[in-house]
Image (cartoon, grey):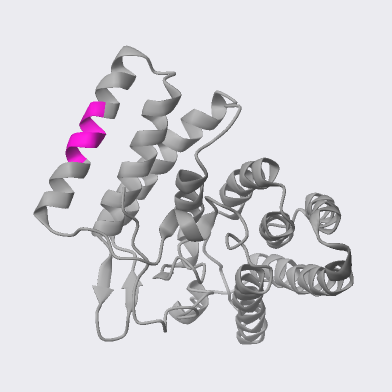
Amino acid sequence: MLFDLRSGKRRRVVQVVFGFLAFIFFISFVGFGIGSDVSGGIFDAIGLGGSDSGDDVESTYEQQIDEAEKQLDEDPKDEKALTDVARYRYLAGQENLSFDEESGVATLTEEARSEWNLALDSWEQLLKLDPKQVDPQVAGQMVCAYVPPLPICQVQAPADSLDLAGAAATQRLLAEQDETSGAYAQLAAFLFFDGDAKGGQAAVQEALASAEPNQRERLQKELDKLEQDAAEYVKAQQAASGAGGGEEADPQIQNPFGGLGTDTGALPQTAP
């Protein structure tokens, strides 16, 4: 979504709240250990190791995509084929990111966004089939496709490329499969910042129930702070949407996550 920020005062408020959003997502991944305590979590999904690169990789992805799509022509409800299309479209999009080797920053390009949209189309078709389980690696990739600027995803992208509701739906599946406090805490973050306070509170309770007893007090405080900051974000977003005038939003505001999490010097790559 794009934010129509007419008032300079509102723009400053939203810019500050976007800072909260970036910080909270950073805390939710690092502080809660999202993916680190779950085999097949988001860290595993996008990986920190290098992958093959070059024309051979691209042609491999094309071949795998073609094979999966042919299978779907025969059976549109083939869950494995839908998963494979999502996986390899995501990887094809990753290969099309604009990557600055000096800064370690990747930027979402039209080509990458196009591939990721196709990946998400296939993923959402899969979810309509109500699968009993989903591949956690591919689910993690889809979370990055929904919200590229997450610190662990390390991709700069404009605000209109973010889909918190889509990310929440996928994160819910991961949380229900893994049942870890970190997975539920990340779900709470997506829901709170998408304006679903009731759903976020339910996820908080699941996170607390899944946490070790000696960690619950700290986790409760962090989640309370997360809920407060999300409420400020939602309030500022609503105020910005209702503002009048003709002033355009600053590009910096359109990218709420800025460069957070991109100072590691390398873009996470995922091998098939």
Residue 243 makes an appearance in the image? no
Residue drawn where x is 63% and y is 79% of the image:
23
Count numbered badges in the picture: 0
Q: Is residue 245 left or right of residue 267?
A: right
The x, y position of residue 264, in whole percent, is: 41, 81
Q: Is residue 150 left or right of residue 37?
A: left
- Residue 260 part of the magenta-drawn span: no
Which residue sits furthest top? Answer: 74
On the rendered structure, is 43 left or right of 19? Answer: left
Question: Where is residue 223 drawn, in percent x and y?
Answer: 80, 68
Rendered location of residue 185, percent (x, y): 72, 60
Q: Is residue 191 visible?
A: yes
- Residue name at image x 31 percent, y 85 percent: 103
The magenta region covers: 62-67
> Considering depth in this image, is 132 or 246 the residue closer to the camera?
132
Q: Is the magenta stretch mostly helix, strand or loop?
A: helix
Residue 211 occupies which quadrant of the picture? bottom right
**Residue at image point 82% right, 57% down:** 204
Residue beneath the point at 58% across and 63% down: 36
Q: In which quarter of the image is residue 236?
A: bottom right
Question: Compared to 255, does 269 lie above or below?
Answer: above
**10 above or below 39?**
below
